[in-house]
Image (cartoon, rainbow, N blue to C red):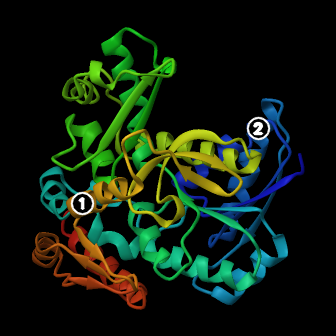
Amino acid sequence: MARTTIMMIGVGDLGGHVLEMLVRVPGSRRIITADVNEEWVYRKTNIATFGASQLGFYPETESVKIDLYNIDQTAKIISEYKPDIIYSAVSLQSWWVINTLPKEVFDELDKARFGPWLPMHLTLVYKLMQAVKQTGLNIKVINSAFPDAVHPVLNKVDIAPEIGIGNVANPVPAIRGSIGYQLGRPLKDVTVYFFAQHYVSHYLPRFGTTGGAPYYLKAAIDGEDVTDQLDLEKVFAEIPTHFRRPGGRDGQILTASSAAAIILAMADDSNDLTHAPGPGGLPGGYPVRVNRNGGTVILPKGLSEEEAIRINEEGQRFDGIDKIDTDGTVHYTAQTAAIMKEMLGYDCKVLTLEDSEAQSKELGLKFKTFAEQYK
């Protein structure tokens, strides 16, 4: 198989974990790391390469500075390296930042859900996708930043990344483990097909329910459908108890594992079965077969793609996004907009693609001012 070139953009907390995984996997791959912090990306790439060598792996690595705000420059750098795959782990505010607030304050702000933070995740990915389009190259993009909503927004203007990572994928191992526990079988014997939006993946490991948000789940063992044998309420209830795990930044390794699995499946054209948000620009998360072109949604018998999309669009409202217009304009739910205005002084009921950058700056400043009082 020909050598695959992977460009990783953003080598922070999540991207750093993914890099450490990729350099320790056998295969013929070239890894280009890119970050706005030139010194950091150089050092991080070196230590990952050195660590891999101690385990007998010698990956081909290189680092470069990149500034996604400069679309022309980004397009030029991408054109020079000609990656087959770009993995983007960039965001203007990582999802865990609001978790650093005092618990009682976080609990109140969290009622606005994840949707209103969309400009912090959409802005740079939008710029990256414009740069990729400008190159004219056939590059497949994997995105980490809120793919459940970012991808359907960008899909409206025909520049959505191929696939996302994490989110729906994160509770799947625990769901499989809990099903196996209920039926007396090991995790590896259990296959699930889980359709759910980001909100569910956030809520389920913490509270053992989907919080009222819709989902679809089918389970199989040795190819046989065992869904009717399950008490799904009990399966879910075991996740934060018997199958509890670290959350927040300490749980980031689980998301990184999802990213690495999808990157490798695309690089190796393996057609692996996994779960991912935003495949082909769709809203929410799905079971997918992943190959060099991205992820193909797997629909169990009895579930149509239209119904799967409906489930995820309805689930989107639990995350504070009421609807996405045909031009990519996002409408927040009234409750979400009201909480953000009351707590942060951030008044935004509708977000357009053109306003995303300005809104990200305003929201970032409003949150910084708000958080300062709790330091």
Please give the name of the residue rendered at 63% of the width and 79% of the height, measured from the top-left corner. Answer: 67
Position of the N terminus by quadrant: top right
Q: Position of residue 246 (x, y in %)?
A: 36, 34
Q: Is 275 left, or right, of 329 in this rendering? A: right
Q: Which residue is mark 2?
A: 52
Q: Position of residue 88 (x, y in %)?
A: 59, 63
Please give the name of the residue rendered at 86% of the width and 45% of the height, measured from the top-left corner. Answer: 28
Q: Residues within 10 Å of mark 2 (few under 14, many from 20)?
A: some
Q: Earlier in the sequence, mark 2 or mark 1?
A: 2
- Of labels 2 and 1, the one closer to you: 1
Q: Does residue 249 lie above or below 281 as drawn?
A: above
Q: Nearer the viewer, residue 46 or 296?
A: 296
Residue 314's label in the rendered image is 1
Residues under labels 2 and 1: Cα distance? 44 Å
Q: Nearer the viewer, residue 249 or 230?
A: 230
Position of the C terminus by quadrant: bottom left
Image-quadrant location for residue 261: top right
Q: Are marks 2 and 1 in contact (CB under 8 Å)?
A: no
SS at circle 2: helix
Q: Does residue 155 lie above or below 260 as drawn?
A: below
Residue 145's label in the rendered image is none
Q: Amino acid at mark 2?
A: Ala
Q: Position of residue 53 (x, y in %)?
A: 82, 36
Q: Amino acid at mark 1?
A: Glu
Q: Residues within 10 Å of mark 1 (few under 14, many from 20)?
A: many
Q: Nearer the viewer, residue 148 or 5?
A: 148
Please give the name of the residue rendered at 42% of the width and 39% of the height, measured from the top-left corner. Answer: 301
